[in-house]
Image (cartoon, grey):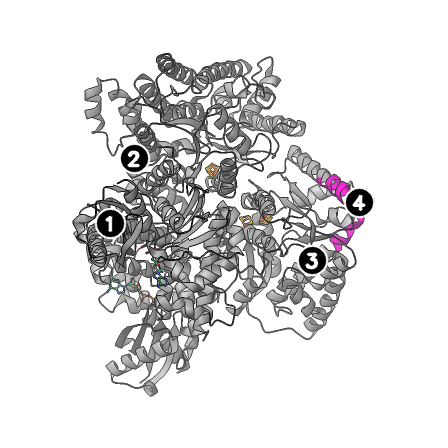
Amino acid sequence: MMDFFRKTAAGITNPHVEDWIKRGGRVIGYTCSLIPPEIFHAAGLLPFRLRGIGTTSMETGDAYYGPYVCTFPKCLLQLAGRGDYGFLAGAVVSTGCDSMRRLDECWRKAGRDFPGILPEFFHYFDAPHKTEPHAAAWFEGEIRRLIRAVESFFGADITDEKLKESICVYNKTRRLICELEDLRAAENPVISGEDAFCAILASSAVPPEKFNEHMEHLLDELRSKKATGGGKAKKRLMLAGSINDDPGLMRLIEEAGAAVVADSICFGTRGADRPVDAVTDPVAALGQKYLAGCLCPRMFGEYDRRLNALAEKLTRSGAEGIILQNIRFCDLHGSENSLLEKDLEKNGIPCLKLEREYGPLTDTGRMKMRIEAFVEQIS
Amino acid sequence: MSIAAGCDVGSLTSKAVIMENGRIKSVSVMRSGTRPQVSAESVMNDALGRAGLSMRDISFCVATGYGRKNIPFADKSVSEIACHGRGARWLVPSARTVIDIGGQDCKALRLDKKGEIAKFTANDKCASGTGRFLEVMARLLQVSMEELGGMSARAAAPVTMASTCTVWAQSDVVRYINSGCRLSDIGAGINTAMAKRAAILANSVGVENDICMTGGVAKNQGVVKELEKLLGARIKRSKKADPQAAGAIGAALFAAAHIKAGE
Amino acid sequence: MRPEIYEYDFDWMLWRCMEAAGKIADGRQKETRRMLEYIPYFRDTAEVFVNLGKPGITFMKMISRYLENIVCARKQGKKVAMTTFCFSPSVFYAMDIVPVTLEVMTVLATALWKRGTADYMDYCVELGFTETSCSAQRGSLGAYLAGLGAEIDFIVTNTAGVCDTNANAFAFSHKHLNKPFYSLNYPSGLTDEASSRYHREDFRGLVAFLENQTGKRLDQDRLKQVLEETAKQEKIVGEMEELQMIVPNPMPAAYNFIIYGGRFMFAGMPEYTKLVSDMLGVVRKNAEKGVSGLFSGKERIRAFFFYIDHYNMGLSLWDFLDRHGISHLGGILSRSFKDDAPYMKGMEDVAYRIDTADLDSMIDSIAMINSRMPMVRSIRGPYDRPNMWLEDSLMLAEIYRADCLIYNGTPGCRNTWSNVKLMAGDLEKAGYPAHIMSGDAFDERVESWESTSARLEEFFRIRGLL
Amino acid sequence: MIAAGCDIGSLSAKAVILENGGILASAMMPAGTSPPESARAVMDKASEAAGIARESVKNVIATGYGKDLVSFASDVESEIVCHAKGAFWVNPKTRTIIDIGGQDSKVIRLDENGKVVRYFYNDKCASGTGRFLEVMAEALEVDLEDMGALSEQSCNELVISNQCVIFAETEVVSLINDGKHVPDIIAALHRAMAGRVAAMAIGIGVEDEVVMTGGVAKNSGLYSALCGALKKELAPIDGIDPQITGALGAALIAAGRL
Ligand SMILES: Nc1ncnc2c1ncn2[C@@H]1O[C@H](COP(=O)(O)OP(=O)(O)O)[C@@H](O)[C@H]1O
Ligand SMILES: Nc1ncnc2c1ncn2[C@@H]1O[C@H](COP(=O)(O)OP(=O)(O)O)[C@@H](O)[C@H]1O
Ligand code: SF4
Ligand code: SF4
Ligand code: SF4
């Protein structure tokens, strides 16, 4: 079972995506935890959250983006330039953060210079940075705009019913992820943080039905394992901060003698906690979830909500410390991490702040040393 | 009698310390080669030689530093952060803040009353603010590390450096040299830039007296004095041993503790 | 932060410097010059203004008034708001609130003090700011986070959706100082119905917040006054900007700086009106004489700065422009996009109007002003959308007959460094030589002015402009 | 009429002497810390090679980092212009020049008359410069001159992830420790560097023909890595040592002003 998840996490495409396309299905890529995949699912498309894994050089990324920019969106552009995203029928870029939103311009421009790397359907999703009613209304407007755009381009008809069905499918995904989280909370971990991360990551890379199916099997496996008392206990850490889709980062941490038992990052469990209301008006419900529920520091002035969510997860997972990492040039997570560090340490939770580059994890010595020292510190 | 050893294989230098019930028998500092094992062997043999001992006499050896994982004769490995904390505490028993500037990075540690590590942070995004930075600059200026350290004292008008990154600084230095600046003024500027980075790091973990500096750069008086200015506090020097060996001393102390626990 | 920095209040120190500068400027030219040398760690910045004669001196006095207000706010029982240059202070003045505009304070300290603002910037990093975040805020924010300035009552920002690193700096302060916070937030659209409606609602949210913070209702008559004053000011500025189109440009190089600097500090206040009328007088004279506003009197190049200016080394940029006979045609900071602005002819629909008929239309008016502040208007959405960065720049470059366009920003500016290369490419395609300055407008440590200016000069020569 | 160009670079000093439109002689030597001396020395060396007296050189134009300190130069020119002149003189089909020197790398675009229409610098980071390769050659204990040949023996793909020269160096050291093959490491270094230079070129647009100037152009491994990154063949710049292109351009300008 794990193979399936490990394979999926290893590279950007996976057998399910290829299979989906072979059977004439179309795939749509999206960038941020702000964009509801339910919309694409309801249109019969395969939602695929854009990943930067497997980037080895930056000649396209750096050609359009300037210096001083987060390497994650740069890697997305690099892969697009390399043609790796040729399988996309469409892409939606969100205004997650400045580095991310400029992917819209950079990708379009690169598309003019290198024909064929820009998906035919290319949409800019403009999300507010706060949640007051008038901002929520704007967000719902954006959802409707996206729905209309998808409908007219892909000739789909996204009815409220279909949306509600998709919401249910994804609610199940969210529920299963939470169950996995609970299993990780057991003090003898039944699954490594790396494997758990691979599994969770798959939820945005394969058809949700397939994911749910595999996840249920995995959970059964793990439950039986738990009965027979899982692996040996290690230092239990939580990982938070900047976006990451590279299982290698988890491996790195766990090689330093810790177990990652929970996370709050994009591609991890961030935002899996609450289900979407599947009875009321679906657009409003999605707005509630994806804007009001957004746990990214891009939501200005909502630090307390994020702090509480984090603190709660820390207790639930029984983590003994937390690694707060940010990708270089990510000011949002960077400074947020410092606030979190102060507040969490006040409550006696050891914190390690790390700044890193996103990209090939080849030279990890310095990072490892810090994590090892941190593990020693909390033991 | 039980003899403890500590071996710190750093990116630039390797250090070994032999200790017998809390007293240093010998210290050795050498340039690291490309292969950690080899560096470890030779520095340890040198230290043993000085102490008139052989590997067999060592009851327990702790390794630290970047190369610590592949050291054949080590019984245990401990991170250099822990080792520098312990070593600094031995050098300056009242130390509550440790600033360690080695070849690869710059670390700031805050210790609690018992000397346990309460908080640490390290700068390694960029080579500026590392001993390596000083070496590169020293090479550009064609002076030795010692001379570079002395330059601050002799400087008339220290230059300001684009402190953000080694390479930017490099072209700055080249420009200064070409425009005929006095070398000592450039050197002083370099030391100051280094100290500024370290000061930011130290302040971000929160400086508490007393302050102790470890790592090779602790031997750079220019940096130390500048750092004192920036922190507005004196940095306690220790006559007990070479601060560059602090990591190895800490490792040896861990080894000794292990032996004690065993007895 | 170095212990001795804790000795002095940041804004108090700035105020004393500016006071002194303003006072001695009353003296005769010769003694003025001599006096200038005696101001503690004062840069040749004052030169730049003194050389401008009356308007320059009025400007210095205005700055010291602005600083005085901040320093004395508490005593006068006024509330102090920390805010950004992307925000028009008029609403504050209408509610008797004293604004502390971080970027303005940073520019002042960068320009005035030999040691610049590095200490405050680094202090932010010590507090946990990423060192990669924008220096425009860090340069003065450090002082306020360290309690070395007027106590802040609440924080108002205008850059959510426009610039993360900016908005983030204020969000951080909101937590660190534990002060109330309101963030206006902008959609990528500017003129569509939905966006305009949103602008109005969002701004009403702000008014409610301010009323709540001050415990006073927004005074309609006061607001009317401020807005009418603003309209008057923009009319005068508009006339200057009309004359600025003439070849040679009769406007002195440093005037753009004064225009936006003044606007950020005193939009809607009589101080600013007086200032700009003084300036208009000078520009008119030059125009009648048909001479360039540069000290050299000779205009060789017309340059449009399509982002911000460069404030290091005592405003060396302006001296550089004067020495090389380069007319500064303004930039993203200096244009206000009011409907009667000379460059808005035929596109009034995308400009803002000031309508003082009733409270509602007045609030709508400020909302529209704010949605067209620097950055807020031009870099909120994709740069190549209508009325965004590219269109604005090309439009202005054409109207003002620019020979070239120049970018200067800060490495902290994710936002523009993510697409400035694309901008430069498109500008070149449109036939304008475009240069990207790689320094930091506020932080000398990023790139020395020496190399920055060398690159600039090289650009002018190689592209056959000099 | 004899004219000369003198390019005092960050790492090497170069001089070219022209006699009525033809190269009479050229010289090159490592640049010391004193540009004036380097300049004098390299000019003497060149005149010696040309078998002429220094005085018979009627006009000298200086370029490079140390250009302003060349006392005997009648004027200075930017490296951009000089490399453009030099490259265009050797190959008039040149539209794009990639110059990688010791302290910086530049991309220059020319029109059909050899006029500079756009250019872009990378001097913010040594990772795209000759210095990068020098540091690595040292770490690998190989000669700079051999890096090209060695990289051609590479058989496995490695990745160097560090931008910063200093850290890339330690990354290289750890690769050696892991027993990786030197040729593979060198090839990876070339790819990393070529990628960065290519990004800069693509950023302002690459037009055929593309030529490479500056000392690093002599590194065949980087040369082919760059072709790979740009997905096109670069035109060789025949007849001259690419490292003297700047000095040649300066000389051409000097001659033109006589
Ligand atoms: N005698 C000295 N004077 C000044 N600086 C020195 C001296 N010796 C070493 N250094 C500095 O110390 C650095 C090496 O420190 P060290 O702690 O040995 O690094 P590491 O532990 O990473 O190998 C060198 O880069 C150099 O800058
Ligand atoms: N034979 C060679 N093989 C490979 N690289 C070389 C060779 N000769 C010089 N270089 C490279 O050229 C660089 C110097 O180039 P140069 O154009 O002279 O720089 P600058 O003009 O800045 O002095 C050196 O850093 C080195 O990397
Ligand atoms: S971190 Fe925030 S902005 Fe970045 S991808 Fe995740 S949700 Fe979007
Ligand atoms: S890590 Fe930060 S900068 Fe990078 S994409 Fe996510 S939010 Fe944006
Ligand atoms: S300069 Fe850039 S980063 Fe700074 S405030 Fe302006 S837009 Fe934001």
In the picture, the disc for residue B178 is 1
Compared with C97, D157 (above or below) is below
Instruction: Tell which subunit mark 3 falls on.
Output: A
Seen in the image, is C19 located left or right of residue A139?
left
- The answer to whether residue D161 shows anywhere in this view is no
Instruction: Tell which subunit mark 1 falls on.
Output: B
Mark 2 element type: loop
- The answer to whether residue A266 shows anywhere in this view is yes
In the picture, the disc for residue A203 is 3
Q: Residue A336: x percent and y percent? A: 51, 47
In space, the residues marked 1 and 2 are separated at their CA atoms by 28 Å
Name the residue that disc number 4 marks. Answer: A156
Label 3 CA crowd tier, 10 Å (few <14, some 14–19, many 20+)? many
Identity, as a three-letter code, of the amino acid under mark 1: Asn
Quadrant of the image containing the N terminus of chain A: bottom right
Instruction: Tell which subunit mark 2 falls on.
Output: C
Q: Earlier in the sequence, mark 3 or mark 4?
A: 4
Residue at image location 55% in from the left, 15% down from the top: C220
Q: Is mark 3 within 8 Å of ligand 3?
A: no
Residue at image location 59% in from the left, 49% down from the top: A114
Q: Quadrant of residue A280?
A: top right
Q: Are marks 2 and 4 in contact (CB under 8 Å)?
A: no
Q: Which residues are magenta?
A: A146-172
